[in-house]
Image: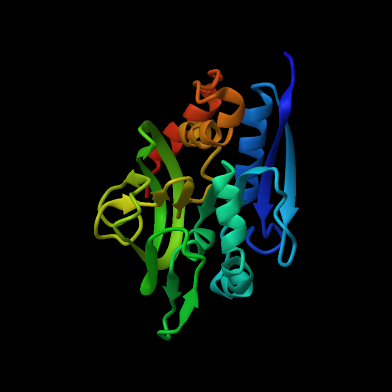
Amino acid sequence: MNRRPGFVIVHLYPDLLLSYGDRGNVMTLAKRAEWRGFTVRVEGVTRSEPIPRDARLILIGGGSDSLQSAVATDLAGRRNELEAALEEGSVVFAICGGYQLLGHRYIDSAGDAIEGVGLLDIETFAGTERIVGRVTGQGSLHDVRFRVSGFENHAGRTFLGSKAVPLMSVPEGQGNNTKDHTEGAVQGRVIGTYLHGPVLPSSPGLADALLSMALEPWTGGAPLEPLDDTLENAASESARSRRR
C-alpha cells in the first residue's frame, strides 16, 4: 500500500488529563488511519506549549476536578489557537473533563465557576451524586450514524444550548444530565462526550466518523476504506450485554 501524506494527531495535556485510558483513543485513531495507508504522527502538547500548525485531530482527555482546574486557564487561553486550527480543517474531540472545559463554564459544588474555552454551547453544573455505568446508544455525527459503547463516571450535569446538538441518545438516567436522554455534544467540528472505556476501540463507527472529518483534505470527503471490525464489534456487543 502506498503511504499517504502525514496525518498529525495532537494529544492535549497527556501528562494531566489521562485518568481514564484516553491514550487508547489516540492509539485507535492513529492505527485506523495507518491501516488505511496514512503516515501518522502523534504529538503530546501540555501547558504553555503550542499546538502544531499541521494538527488535524486534537484530543483532550478526562481527569479529576483538581486536574481540570489545573488546565482550565491554559485551555481557555487557547481559544484563538483552537479556532485557527478548526478553520484550517482540524477536528477537536474531548472526553469527560475535557468535554466540560470546551463549554462556557463548569459550576462546582461550592457554586464557583471554572470558565471554559467556549467552543461548545454547553454549561455544566456539579451534581450531588455520580452518574456511573455502562452506556450504549445510537450516535450521529454530520449525518453519519453509528453505535457507541463506553463507560460513564461523572458528577457533572451538562445542558446543551441552541448551537450544540447531542452526539447520541441514551436510556433514561444516563448521559449528559439523566433527564433529556442526550449524551455528548457536537458543534461544527468540535465533539465532546462523557464516555470512557476508552470509548473509541469499541466504537469504530465513531472513530471513523472523526477520522473522515479530519482526513477530508486527502480524501475529498470520500468514504474511508472499510476495515475488518470483527473484534471491535464483538467488544461493543459484550459491553451492551453487560450494560449497567
Residue 36 is at least partly visible in this image: yes
Is residue 138 positioned above or below 110 on the image? Answer: above
Tell me where residue 75 appears, x and y as whole percent. 60, 66
Q: Nearer the viewer, residue 148 or 32?
A: 32
Residue under the image location 41 percent in, 68 percent down: 156
Colour logic:
rainbow
Is residue 21 positioned above or below 30 on the image? Answer: below
Number of marks in picture? 0
Tell me where residue 148 appears, x and y as whole percent. 42, 39
Residue 130 is at least partly visible in this image: no
Q: Quadrant of residue 122?
A: bottom left
Residue under the image location 55 percent in, 18 percent down: 225
Tell me where residue 183 appears, x and y as whole percent. 36, 51
Q: Quadrant of residue 38?
A: top right
Q: Residue furthest top?
A: 1
Q: Nearer the viewer, residue 69 or 20?
A: 69
Residue under the image location 74 percent in, 48 percent down: 43
Does 32 sit left or right of 202 as displayed?
A: right
Does 3 sit left or right of 63 as displayed?
A: right
Does 38 sit left or right of 202 as displayed?
A: right
Is residue 135 positioned above or below 205 on the image? Answer: below
Tell me where residue 203 appears, x and y as whole percent. 48, 36
> Which image quarter is the N terminus in?
top right
